[in-house]
Image (tube, rainbow, N blue to C red):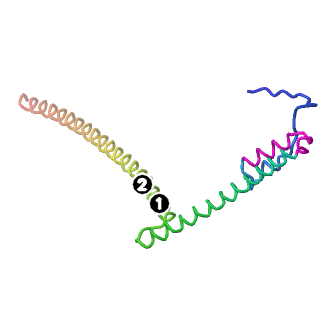
Amino acid sequence: MAQIFRVERTKNFTVMSNHHFKNKNLTLNAKGLLSLMLSLPELFFENYEMQDEIRKLNDEIHRLTTELSETQKLNQLLQKNNDDLRNRNGLKSRSEQELLEEEIKDVRDQNSKLQIQVNKSSVQAVDEAYRKQKEAEKQLRSLKHQAEQNRKIAEKEVQKLKKG
């Protein structure tokens, strides 16, 4: 486990709120830039050249955010057009296709489970038949033994009757 070292800082560190890190509307670049800006000394911002650079970077961030939003809208439109085209050609939409594939997967899983049960049942049936066969063989041996005993008794009786 890693050790945590707590040190009292008096210089060369930055304390900032987590608010901008949790803001889902900001890109990672914007969060990084804001963190960098908050870490800079206030005298830094008095330099007009840097302020101009920051303005340019903010404009670039805004442009990229707008571009990302437009790209996402275009992607949604393309997906809708793709689904419309699939429908016109008698195919299912992408979401319907995914749902159908999920249902097929569920049916295959259920079939697999049923096959396992059938295999278990088959094994149990074979075991039961084997047990019944062994029981029948045991009864047959018992009956043969009993018949042999009866035969011996009958032979003795016949011997007695012949002698007597």
Q: Is residue 14 left or right of residue 78?
A: right
Q: Label 1 to label 2, Cα distance in Å?
A: 9 Å
Give the x, y percent position of residue 99: 50, 62
Q: Nearer the viewer, residue 74 or 124?
A: 74
- Amino acid type, callout 1: Glu
Q: Which residue is mark 1?
A: 103
Give the x, y percent position of residue 57: 76, 49
The stretch of residues the image draws in magenta is 29-47
**CB atoms at circles 1 and 2 under 8 Å apart?**
no
Task: Tell me the SS state at disc 2.
Answer: helix
Q: Nearer the viewer, residue 13 or 48?
A: 48
Give the x, y percent position of residue 103: 47, 60
Relative to residue 82, is residue 59 depicted above or below? Answer: above
Quadrant containing the N terminus is top right
Q: Is residue 45 magenta?
A: yes
What is the crowding at mark 2: few (fewer than 14 residues within 10 Å), some, or many (at least 20)?
few
Q: Residue at x 78, y 45 (%)?
A: 33
Instruction: Give the residue furthest to the front.
Output: 49
- Amino acid type, callout 2: Arg
Give the x, y percent position of residue 109: 44, 52
Q: Give the label on residue 108, or none.
A: 2
**Mostly what secondary structure, the magenta segment?**
helix
What is the crowding at mark 1: few (fewer than 14 residues within 10 Å), some, or many (at least 20)?
few
